[in-house]
Image (spheres, rainbow, N blue to C red):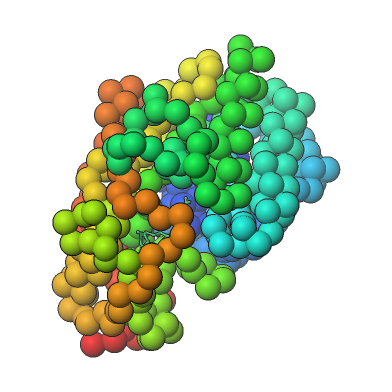
Amino acid sequence: MAIMSKGRVLATGGTGYIGSHAVVELIKAGYEVEIIDNLYNSKAAVLGKIAELTGVGPKFYNVDMCDKPALMEVFARGNYDAVIHFAGLKAVGESVEQPLRYYATNVGGTLNLLDCMRAYGVKKIVFSSSATVYGVQETPKCEETMSTGSGISNPYGKTKFVIEEILKDAATADPGMEVSILRYFNPIGAHPSGLLGEDPNDRPNNLMPIVMKVATGEIDKLTVYGNDYPTPDGTCIRDYIHVVDLVKGHLAALEKMRPGAQIYNLGTGQGSSVMEIINEFSRVGGIQLPYEIGARRAGDLASLYADPMLAERELGWKAELSVANAMRDTLTFLRKEGLKLRV
Ligand code: UD1
C-alpha cells in the first residue's frame, strides 16, 4: 500500500549541512522532498547518503537562487505545498569583503523564491534565520520579543535581518501566507550514522568545523579568540544545539504553520564556553586538541543563548541531545569519512 504523503516540500540548500539533515528527517516523517542547491558549499555525494539513510533519492536541481528563470521552471513542475529555505552564504568575514554578493545571494535569492511562490500559489515558507539578528543586547538570553537589527556587525547578519523583515511584510500583505522564521543558535554535531555532517568546501570560520580540522591535523591548532571575557572561564559562551534537534524544530514548525509570520528561537537554552567545547571534544574523542589563547575576534559577544520556551509552548519542540552527543556524532562522522584523528 502506498504511504500517504504529508505534502510536497522544496528544500533550498538541501545538500548543505543543515539542509541535508532536514531532508532526511522530512522524508522519514512522510514528506515528499525535492532539493535545489548550486553545490557552492556542499557536495553532490550527499544525495547518495540521503538515499542510503531514507531509501528515497530526492529529486535534485542544480540551480542557483539568483537564476530566477531556472527557479521558476522548478516551481512550474514542483506542485509544492511548502518551501524550507536554507540556501544562502554564511561566512561572516567574507560578507564584510563582498557585501554585494551576500545581499544579492541571500536577499535577492529570497526575493526570487517569494516571486516563484506567488506565481505558483505556494503559501508556506520556513526560513533559516540566525541568532545574529539580535545584534547587541543588554542581556545574553535572547527572547523572540526582543528588538532586532541593532548592532549587527556584518553584512551576513544584516541579510538575515533584512530577509526576516521582508518575510514579515509579505505575510502582512497576503493574509494567506504562512511564514515560520527560525532563529538558529550554534548548530553542531552530525547525523548519528556518521553519513552526514558539516563539510564546508572553504576554510571554515565557525568553531566546530575548525575543531574538526584541528582534530584531523588539517589545521595545526585552534586559536581561542580571547579568554578575558566576563564569563566564568573568560572564554565566550554560546548555545550549541545538535543539528538533529535543530532540524526536528523545522518539522515541528512545518506541522504548526498558520497564517502570518511566526518567529522561534531554536536553541537549547544552555550556554557552553569555548573552553568547555574544546574539553568536551577532547574528552569524548580521547584526543588532545592543541590550542592557544589569541586575541578577541571583532564583533564577538561575551555570552549569547536562547530562551527556547516559545518553541516548546507553541511547537511542542525542545532540544533533547547534549553537547557530548554532538561530539560523539561529529567524531563518528570524521571516522566514517576515513579521516585519521590525532591521538
Ligand atoms: C558566528 C557569527 C554569526 C553567525 C554564526 C553562524 C560572528 C561574530 N558571528 O557566530 O553571525 O550567525 O557564526 O555562521 O562571526 N571561536 C574561537 N576560535 C575559532 C572560532 C571560533 O575561539 O577559531 C569562538 C568564537 O569567539 C565564539 C565561539 O567560538 O565565541 C563560536 O564561534 P562561531 O562558531 O564563529 O559562532 P558565533 O560567533 O556564535
Q: Nearer the viewer, residue 21 or 59?
A: 21
Name the quadrant containing residue 108.
Answer: top right
Please name the residue shown 83% across and 43% down the image: 69
Please name the residue shown 19% across and 66% down the image: 280
Residue 329 percent location from the top left of the image: 29, 64
Q: Is residue 118 rendered to the left or right of residue 187? A: right
Please name the residue shown 69% across and 59% down the image: 98
Residue furthest toward the right?
69
Q: Nearer the viewer, residue 142 or 76?
A: 142
Res 334 seen here: no
Residue 326 percent location from the top left of the image: 27, 59
Where does the N terminus fall, quadrant-wise?
Answer: top left
Residue furthest toward the top?
175
Q: Answer above or below: position of 12 versus 276.
A: above
Q: Is residue 322 rendered to the left or right of residue 152? A: left
Res 171 seen here: yes
Residue 294 percent location from the top left of the image: 35, 74
Please name the residue shown 22% across and 45% down the image: 270
Where does the C terminus fall, quadrant-wise?
Answer: bottom left
Q: Answer above or below: position of 89 versus 208.
A: above
Count of picture labels: 0
Residue 168 percent location from the top left of the image: 58, 23
Q: Nearer the viewer, residue 164 or 134?
A: 134
Q: Quadrant of ligand 1?
A: bottom left
Q: Answer above or below: position of 200 versus 181.
A: below
Q: Answer above or below: position of 87 versus 218.
A: above
Q: Is residue 270 rendered to the left or right of residue 49? A: left
